[in-house]
Image (tube, helix red, strand yellow):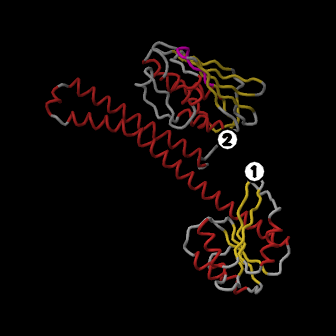
Amino acid sequence: MHRLKVLVTDDEREMRRAVERALTPYTLRLPDVEQEIGFEVVQATSGEEALEKIAADVPDILLLDHKMGGMSGLDVLDELAGQDRDMITVMITAYASLETAVIATKRGAFDFIAKPFTPLELKETVRKATSHLISQREARRLTQEKRQVRFQFISVLAHELKAPLGAIEGYLSILSDRSMRQDPEKVDQMVQRSLIRCEGMRKLIYDLLDLTRIESGLKKRDLVQADVVEVAQAAIETHRAAAADRGITIELHGDGGANMTADRSELEIILNNLISNAIKYNRERGRVDVTVTTEDEQVLIRVSDTGIGMTPEECARLFQDFVRIKNNKTKNILGSGLGLSTVRKLANLYGGDATAASRPDEGNKLQFIDSWALNFA
């Protein structure tokens, strides 16, 4: 059970004890909060004592009497004004009036309860205050989490762009030496390497755009009946030249009934990423097999290759943002680390998942499954 601390500040002893009797056994459950919430009640006899206790240990909820000997409740609110404390205040008064409620609210009070009140009225007021407090804390937590994710995202992005930019800058510095231009073969080599680095950065930018459109929900979707075999064939043709340069054979295996309701551009992103990876991480004169079948009213897309393979631990990390498997076999292979992450996010968009299976030096098998209910697993 999660307990919130309630500081009841009132110069009437019986009022403080009544609040303690009502709230000590009281528990509640709020929407989206898994834990049961209980209350620990501490007491202060004056505004001055309340400020001392708040300074020593900030309560979660402050129940503050308006009229007391010495400092009034409004005086306490004035002292607390401008202080960044994770606390919510409820004013208690025997002089209930709209004017007092407005003043208290302007000075930072969340709610207002008038004496005399019943235990049920007190519990309802505390329930509302607790709900508001928990919502505020959750909003702050999410905001901080988003800041952290944004920071990590920008840090990784800067890291991914630093290497190609540094390489291009190095080549340009060399080319700025006029004596180096006397060797056309070296010039062509450096220009070609710079172009490759630029293409890598362009791919990173395009992958980022795909990813952010999907995650933001801003990507316009056009759901139609799509022939998955036909989309796969088009994707293969897009990558056939790159495969031929390394002597890699690509074969499509599929039946004519593999149709599904989907956004064609999303299917293209999926197949292009799977096939591109199967080529990049393959061995020279290797093979890529793209299989599209229907089983139990599901469309299955499988891409397998004869590449370098992965360990089970590497497979487990494969679909995370900016993750690239880095070892001696992959150190010279360029990539954004976002392609398969995007594939999985698209799978999740359809209510399912994407999976991988592999062993070192035995190639990779990536699977993407669709059911007629647009459910990928």
Q: Measuring 74% from the left and 62% from the top, which residue is drawn there?
A: 40
Q: Where the C terminus falls, by quadrant?
A: top right
* 344 w.r.t. 303: above or below: below
Q: Nearer the viewer, residue 278 or 221?
A: 278
Q: Residue at x 25, y 36 (%)?
A: 172
Toward the viewer: 255 or 316?
316
Q: Which span is picked out in magenta? A: 360-366
Q: Is residue 55 above or below residue 309?
A: below
Whole-percent x and y of residue 238?
50, 27
In the shown orientation, is residue 18 left or right of residue 247?
right
**Residue underneath mark 2:** 223
| Nearer-N-terminus badge (1/2) | 1
230 relative position to 245: left or right: right
- Quarter of image, res 375: top right
Image point (23%, 28%), residue name: 187
Residue designated by label 1 = 34
